[in-house]
Amino acid sequence: MKVTIYDVAKKAGVSISTVSRVLNNTGRISEKTRKRVLRVMEELHYQPSMVASALTGKRTRTIGLVIPDVANPFFSEIARKVEDRGREQGFNVLMCNTDNNPETEEMYLSLLRQKSVDGIIIGTTTNNYTMIKELLEENFPLVFIAQDIPELAINVVRVDDFLGGYQAVSHLVSLGHQQIAIMLGNLSRTSDKYRLQAYQQVLQENDLKCEESWIVYTDYSMADGKRAAMELLQSTPRPTAIFACFDSLAVGIYQAAKELGLRIPDDLSVVGFDNTILSSIIDPPLTTVAQPIEEMGKQAVDLLIAQIEGINHTKQRIILPPHLVVRESACHIAKVKS
């Protein structure tokens, strides 16, 4: 069986990123640690897989894309747009799916560096600040998509999450709803935080009570959205409307409502966020905040290539406007039957 970087890291008692830094001769590592890693590599006969052209200092015309969950329609659509734009520009795209696991994320970032990709687009909720800072110190081309780390000077392409959340909740208020819940992730994504802030501000501006129990956290999946919705919709008092911060969570709400015998929008209004393919095929079609997914993918790839080609060294935060797509999942409170 071929020896991997994980085998080296385990035997040397270091992290995968430390082995990667030894391989790439980057970052701050003690001489003692460096020698130990090199000795383990020799003992295990480890041969790092490197792209031949990269060994000669040439570009590989390959970029990495790291996303949290390809099963999430939003990220699968992002991946497709990144791949399409990359191909148009003559770049291959290597996609890595982390399953929202920080260790898997670290592994893939190290692996992509080993493969000598020219740059990486990151859409995960990374907490690997040390690794990101090291890549930034190397001036390695990086772009974050649909995610941000405000405290770092990084390149970002995302939607205005606060504005999108504001549009969603304001729409429900305009329909007369006063008992509005929000379902989001675990606040590890900046998008969650901005959308929650918008929800709270709209309620405050309209003198509406913000029930703590109506702020519902999930692991982002449809299954957990359904689980959380089952609890929420059996609580007293029950909200008349829910703002789902992701279309995938809205689907979970639909599933729970059906099991409980609640009709959408007659008994419960729902507004989502993303405007993925799911929003137009579920019944009834979902009112949702549209992210400009195609433009986000294009901008992220173009910004990354500009770094790779040395055209632009200035860090940019590109924030694109969302818009509300009104369909059939929310109605006026006067029509809601108790």
Image (cartoon, rainbow, N blue to C red):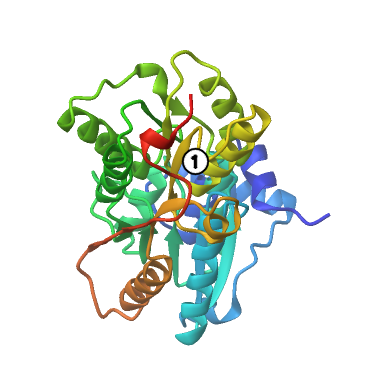
Pick the front one: 62 or 30: 62
Q: Residue furthest top?
A: 236
Pick the front one: 8 or 228: 228
The residue located at (72%, 49%) in the rendering is: 43
Left or right placement of residue 113 versus residue 243 in this view: right
Residue type, numbered disc 1: Pro
Pick the front one: 40 or 240: 240
Pick the front one: 143 or 166: 166
Which image quadrant for residue 190?
top left
Q: Residue furthest left?
A: 205
Q: Please, is residue 226 above or below residue 302 in the view?
A: above
Which image quadrant for residue 245?
top left
Helix, strand or loop at label 1? It is loop
Instruction: Using the rendered image of the protein, determine whether residue 67 is visible from the camera's viewpoint.
Output: yes
Image coords of residue 332 (percent x, y): 37, 40
Residue at which label 1 appears = 265
Image coords of residue 170 (percent x, y): 26, 42
